[in-house]
Amino acid sequence: MSSLADHWNQGGNYLPEGDHNVAIGSYGQVKYNSGNIGVRFSLFDNRRRESHVSFVLTEAALWRIASFAQACGFTQEQCRTYDPYVFANHQRMVGRRLMITIGKGKPSPKDGKQYNEVTSFWAIEGTQDTPATTNPPAVPEQTEDPEDAIPF
């Protein structure tokens, strides 16, 4: 039998440790203490539990976001037109699916605790160049006159 005590301190809506099939739901710009700019992607599983992964945008670190794009199904040819310094280009990641591993990160310098973070990512078998939908399709705006609708 399960009790609430079995689920104590599980972190609410965040992904627990382990492997997860996720979709990229959104992205945002981050600024690091070093002054460098980066991009942060929000990742969601089918139960809407979330995690995040960030990439610093420096020439020396672009291999990481290139690997992430490859795991999301981008081809090398598609990446030729993906300039990571043009922030709007990151919209191309939204809706893509990939596999991630969540593990304990390094102890936080602020409080010494270890928090869950994305420790690795890889492509889902057969997803090259096939973006997936992370959320149900949006309800389209009503463009027709409701009086023209056919009653059922």
Image: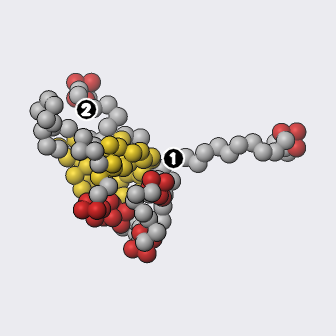
Asked if one can make out residue 95 in the rendered structure from this viewpoint, the answer is: no
**Where is residue 76 shown, x and y percent of the image?**
39, 74
Q: Position of residue 134 (x, y in %)?
A: 48, 50
Tag of residue 121: none
Would you call the spot at circle 2 few (<14 residues within 10 Å), some (14-19), or many (20 or more)?
few
Residue 35: horizontal and vertical position, in percent?
28, 44
Q: Secondary structure at mark 2?
A: loop
Residue at x 23%, y 45% (from the top left corner)? 34
Image quarter where the C terminus lies is top right
Q: Identify the residue at image location x=85%, y=45%.
A: 150
Do callouts 2 and 1 mark residues in contact (Cβ within 8 Å)? no
Would residue 116 be found to the left or right of residue 12 on screen? left
Q: Using the image, tell me which numbered label, if any, was put on residue 135.
A: 1
| C-alpha span from label 2 to label 1 | 24 Å
Residue that carries the numbered disc 2 in the rendered image: 10
- Between residue 63 and residue 35, name the one nearer to us: 35
Q: Residue at x 85, y 41 (%)?
A: 145
Quarter residue 60 falls in: bottom left
Q: Residue at x 65, y 43 (%)?
A: 139
Q: Earlier in the sequence, mark 2 or mark 1?
A: 2
Where is residue 81 shown, x and y percent of the image?
46, 69
Few, some or many residues within 10 Å of mark 1 (<14, 14–19, 20+) = few
Q: Secondary structure at mark 1?
A: loop
Q: Amino acid at mark 2?
A: Gln
Q: In this view of the protein, can residue 8 be seen by the observer?
A: yes
> As drawn, which residue projects farthest toward the bottom?
77
